[in-house]
Image (cartoon, rainbow, N blue to C red):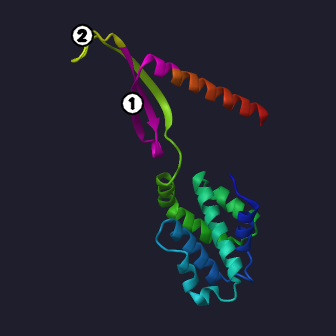
Amino acid sequence: MNLSEDVLKGVEALSDEKNISDNAFKNIVDCCFKVILKQKTESDLFEDKSAISGIDIIVLKQTYSAFIAFILELMKVNSDQATISDLLEDHKLSNNRIQFILNYFKEYRVAIRKALSITNFHFPHIIDINWRLDYFLKSNSLEKLNTPVYIVSLTTEQEEDQKGKVEFACTLDQLQDLVFKLRDAQKQIERSSIKS
């Protein structure tokens, strides 16, 4: 998990029951989950003046943004309830507040994971490759062509075990160039892993 110190401080701020009342806490948690799912906007957090009265606006915004990042990171790695509970407990949240947050994670887990899968920037993972060699002897305009063409078919895994297919045709030179670039990328990865 990749949680920054600012995010963890923001989550820990939710444990301060003197500065953040139960009503304000529930309002923040509800708003964060619903903003991620586009059911609310950030301005909805500030509409209920009675819930946020007495809270410094800067602390409120920092806590709000930290908790959004916290939710997204936990859902990105698909953390289970026990992991989330332990993490919240480590940051001094009371059992009542932990249970309240866990109920939201339980209720919105599937919807948030689905939203994350739609908005990710990851390319599909290649899980299989097939190829074949076609040989064109002649075409409509030329008598003799004698050109080999490679048909490459990549099977990819996208979100939630869905499979996709990418197909392309290339000449021998293009295929050799692709293989060369893949080998070069592999060497770069090996060099990077040795350094770290």
Instruction: Tell me residue 138's x, y (percent).
Output: 26, 12
- Which callout, 2 or 1, points to the residue nearer the camera? 2
Determine the residue positioned at 42% across, 19% down. 171
Secondary element at tag 2? loop
Q: Amino acid at mark 1?
A: Glu
The label on residue 143 is 2
Residue at the disc numbered 1: 167
**Residue sitting at the far right:** 195
Q: Is residue 138 above or below residue 86?
A: above
x and y, in percent, of residue 182 in the image: 57, 26
Q: Nearer the viewer, residue 112 or 155?
A: 155
Residue 189 in the figure: left or right of residue 162: right
Residue 80 percent location from the top left of the image? 61, 54
In percent of width and height, residue 97 lies at: 66, 73
Judge from the rendering whether residue 28 lies leftward or rightward of residue 118; answer left or right: right
Query: 117 and 122: which one is in front?
Result: 122
Principal SS element in the magenta part? Answer: strand
- The picture quadrant where one finds residue 195 is top right
Q: Quadrant of residue 187?
A: top right
Q: In the image, is residue 105 part of the stretch drawn in magenta?
A: no
**Quadrant of res 150:** top left
In the shown orientation, is residue 128 left or right of residue 167?
right
Q: Which residues are magenta?
A: 148-176
* Residue 159 located within the stretch drawn in magenta: yes
Q: Residue at x 64, y 78 (%)?
A: 25
Q: Is residue 120 above or below residue 14?
A: above
Amino acid beneath label 2? Glu
Measured Cα–Cα span from mark 2 to mark 1: 28 Å
Number of residues whose C-alpha sits closer than 10 Å to that of mark 2, classed few (under 14), some (14–19) or many (20 or more): few
Residue 63 in sight from this viewpoint: yes
The quarter of the image holding the C terminus is top right
